[in-house]
Amino acid sequence: MDQQNFFERVYVVARQIPHGRVTTYGAIARAIGAARSARMVGYAMNASHYDDTVPAHRVVNRVGLLTGKHHFNGTNLMQQLLESEGVIVIDNKVQNFQELFWQPPIEEGKMQI
């Protein structure tokens, strides 16, 4: 699969993340059938800043840390966007992460790696 196709599949999933919820790079990777590609999902989120339809601020690491925050313009933009949706962030970590975690649907016909 080429990078552009991979990124677009990531964006399709990311656009489904509900307002006020978060998911992880790994969960998106598993959803598109590329379980070992969480880092590539991160690259896709970084590249998505040119497309305001992709809510990259809702994608965090596996324990709820805002590891992608340095890719956003402004010092705390990722945190501010999450807080504007009612998500509480303390010390760069989403509070109540387990309650706010959104599990993406698995793409049909994709074998999990």
Image: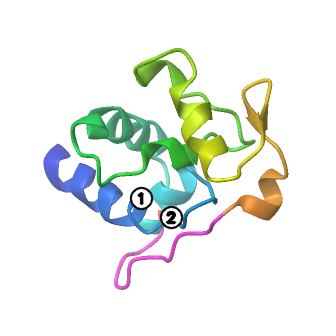
Q: Are marks 1 and 2 in contact (CB under 8 Å)?
A: yes
Numbered mark located on residue 14 in the image: 1
> Horizontal placement of 84 versus 25: left or right?
right
Task: Please give the name of the residue rendered at 50% of the width and 77% of the height, measured from the top-left corner.
Answer: 105
Q: Is residue 110 above or below residue 19?
A: below
Residue marked by disc 2:
17
**Residue nearer the viewer, 58 or 13:** 58
Helix, strand or loop: magenta stretch: loop
Dot 1 crowding, Cα within 10 Å, few <14, some 14–19, many 20+: many
Q: Marks 1 and 2, how far apart in space? A: 6 Å
Residues shaded magenta: 102-112
Amino acid type assigned to the residue bearing label 2 in the image: Ile
Q: Secondary structure at mark 2?
A: loop
Numbered mark located on residue 3 in the image: none
Is 72 covered by the magenta stretch? Answer: no
Q: Residue furthest top?
A: 75
Dot 2 crowding, Cα within 10 Å, few <14, some 14–19, many 20+: many
> Horizontal placement of 37 versus 66: left or right?
left
Amino acid type assigned to the residue bearing label 1 in the image: Ala
Q: Answer whether residue 70 is visible to the viewer in this image.
A: yes
> Horizontal placement of 67 versus 98: left or right?
left
Asked which quadrant contains residue 103, the reply is bottom right
Find residue 100 and report its horizontal and vertical position in percent.
Answer: 73, 60
Task: Please give the name of the residue rendered at 40% of the width and 20% of the height, measured from the top-left corner.
Answer: 73
Where's the N terminus, which quadrant?
A: bottom left
> Horizontal placement of 81 versus 39: left or right?
right
